[in-house]
Image: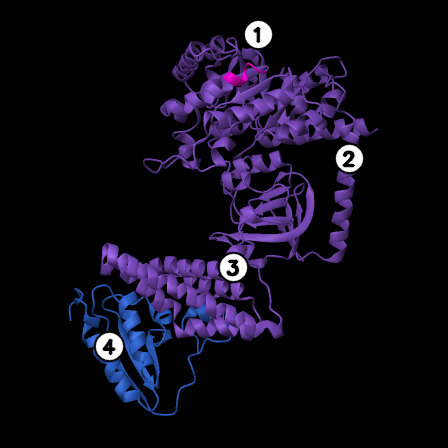
Amino acid sequence: MLKLQGIAVSPGVTIGEALVLDAEGFRIPRRFVERSAVDTELARLAHAVAETAREMVHNRDRINAELGEQYAAIFDAHLAMLHDPRLQQELTAAVRDRNWWPEYAVSRTLRRYAKVFQSLGNHISQRAHDIYDIEKSLLRNLLGQRRETLAAISQPVVVLAHNLTPSETANLDRRFVKGFATELGGPGSHTAIVAEGLEIPAVVGIGPFLADVSGGEPVILDGNEGLVILQPDEETIAQYRLEEEVARSVAVRLGRLRDLPAETTDGVRIEIMGNIEFPSEVEQCIDRGCDGIGLYRTEFLYLTSKREPTEEDHYAAYSEVVQAMGDKPVVIRTLDLGADKMLTEKTPEEERNPCLGLRSIRLSLRQLPMFRTQLRAILRASALGDVRVMFPLVSTIVELRQARMVLADVMEDLTEHGIAFNRKMPVGMMVETPAAALMLDAFIKEVDFVSVGTNDLIQYTLAVDRGNKEVADLYNACDPAVLRLLRRSLDVAAEAGVPANVCGQMSGSVMYTQLLLGMGLRQLSVPASAIPEIKQACRSVSVADCRLIAEKASTMDGAREVKAYLRDQVRRLLAETVA
Amino acid sequence: MGWCPEMAADSRESPIHAGAAAPHGETVSRAVVVANSQGLHARPADMLAREARRWQSRIELVADSQRVDGKSILAVLTLAAEAGTRLVVEATGPDAREALEAIGSLFDRNFNEPAGSQTT
């Protein structure tokens, strides 16, 4: 048994079969062939080698005819490597003597060569690409239609990966992926947010561990403690099965809160809104009794498809959400992505610092046709219910005004074409840069609502890349600098009589509920999974007590002190609730 | 006998690492220099391995601490021998002398490529 500690980013516990994706992509699981089937499997391997060779000859001849001999030479090199007697001997021995599945023998043997070439450093390291090419062709010929990819998972698995991009995470088949763990990543990364949205346990930032695990082995994923347990023993498995059971019964108990309002013990009504990324999550929010959708992230329209989403793609998604919510508010946030993350965008130059680069509202204002398409769809959806639009990462008043101008322009266009929309659709902005928080008294006159995105606010205030595990420990919601900007934002909004909301991960954790209510917040936007717990917390506290807690926290100088204090307060709260 | 350090470390993985047992016969060797400008890249490595496979003898290339099977293009490539690298070609078997001469002449002819810029 091997216990690995990572960073817990999405709660829950699961036990399942491992599916391993390493830095180069899908890793073929270690499987064995029956001794009696060795000859058949060797024949299959020989057939795949012959097929691959035939393809290489074909490619060589085609390229030779089209581009000339010097370009075709690469295929001669591939052929020579494929037919290398030592390689062939090794592959055969792996199947005959070790009874490896041919797919596994190919993958393992060729990747070993690739790794050696990669380590050589000079121009020979380029040969590693050739080896991967040969591996791919051989596997394609071996697996045929059974090609195993992340998109084609057909049984429950726990995904173990070097790293998952947001689009890979968004494309995970929720029916089969029971949880995932990655070597890279930190709390608050997009991947973590998606995991939370999918309501599957996830652990990130574990560090190198994939070498210790093979596909198909049982693994335990503990998203509460941030643990991954490889080769678990019987006792541990039994213990986790019990935990899974308990979690289910707690969920049932919290489910009873559904129809009760989030009202504090001194009678202040708090609104609890849901954060969603996929229309299908609306149901989970309604089931848990939310007061609306406080943050509808639209990035996933752009991430799950290779082409840019059309107006109809947008409209179909938005109208599904709006109609499901009836007359409750739905805040749709416009694209909040860097050009680096988009499948459809070609970044003109590599950005050295994408977090500080062309992203979110900046990208939208640069790509006007794309922005207008999204705004048209949002406006059309506004005819169906209480839709509100929100702009992300606004850092200057000029951006806000430009965005509003584009919106007005699109409205005019719709009017001309006689298309229905809500002319009074509320317009809001995210407060997620120190600039926006500091200048909020100016912004506030030109918006109908604001929402503080704590994830980015923390990252930009503390200058910490939340995806970088080397500095992830500096990323701390309790940092006094963050709390000051947050408090200031809420104060400015309250003074102007403009509704304010907090929609980062901070609002979804009971640790911060008292602090936030004490700072004057009356609306929280949280992941569906957190709604019952946050509602329970709101129902157990008084605003008067919360004010004292916020006051006390604001006198502290260090994040650690604040965190210890808040943790204490939560413990007391929980103790009282249970009593 | 590991034919390159990384592979040797991985020897649990695959039983086939040592070159084939040497056929009976004498061992002869010769020092050569990689003189073509691009070093022992894919094309010359392929030429070398093909030539080596024409002979019964075991052919090995030795560079510093590394000893590789001369009949395998993949093994030869792991030498990452750039222009100017000094190697020893070693042949063991009944046709060792002829094999060594044939392979040595590939080096002498720079594998039919332009010579590198190193001074000799």
Residue under label 4: B32
Are the residues tagged 1 and 3 within 8 Å (C-beta)? no
Residue under label 2: A250
Chain part drawn in magenta: A380-384
Name the subunit of mark 4.
Answer: B
Q: Which residue is drawn at 21% across and 79% down?
A: B105
Judged from the image, the secondary structure of the residue bearing numbered disc 2 is helix
Magenta stretch, main secondary structure, is: loop
Residue under label 3: A143
> What is the three-letter code of the residue carrying label 3?
Leu
Are the residues tagged 2 and 3 within 8 Å (C-beta)? no
Q: Are marks 2 and 1 on the same chain?
A: yes
The letter of the blue chain is B
Q: Which of A43 and A148 is in front in this view?
A: A43
- Image-based side of A508 in relation to A210, left or right: right
Judged from the image, the secondary structure of the residue bearing numbered disc 3 is helix
Q: For marks 2 and 1, give the CA distance.
A: 38 Å
Q: Hey, which quadrant is residue A36 in on the image? A: bottom right
The relative height of residue A219 versus residue B13 in the rendered view (above or below) is above
Return the disc, 1 or 3, that comes first in the chain's sequence.
Answer: 3
The relative height of residue A408 versus residue A187 in the rendered view (above or below) is above
| Residue A151 colored in magenta in the image | no
The relative height of residue A317 versus residue A209 in the rendered view (above or below) is above
> What is the three-letter code of the residue carrying label 1?
Gly
Judged from the image, the secondary structure of the residue bearing numbered disc 1 is loop
Query: Dot 1: within a 10 Å radius of its alpha carbon, few (fewer than 14), some, or many (20 or more) residues?
Result: few
Q: Residue at x 26, y 59 (%)?
A: A64
Residue under label 1: A497
Q: Hey, which quadrant is residue A49 in on the image? A: bottom left
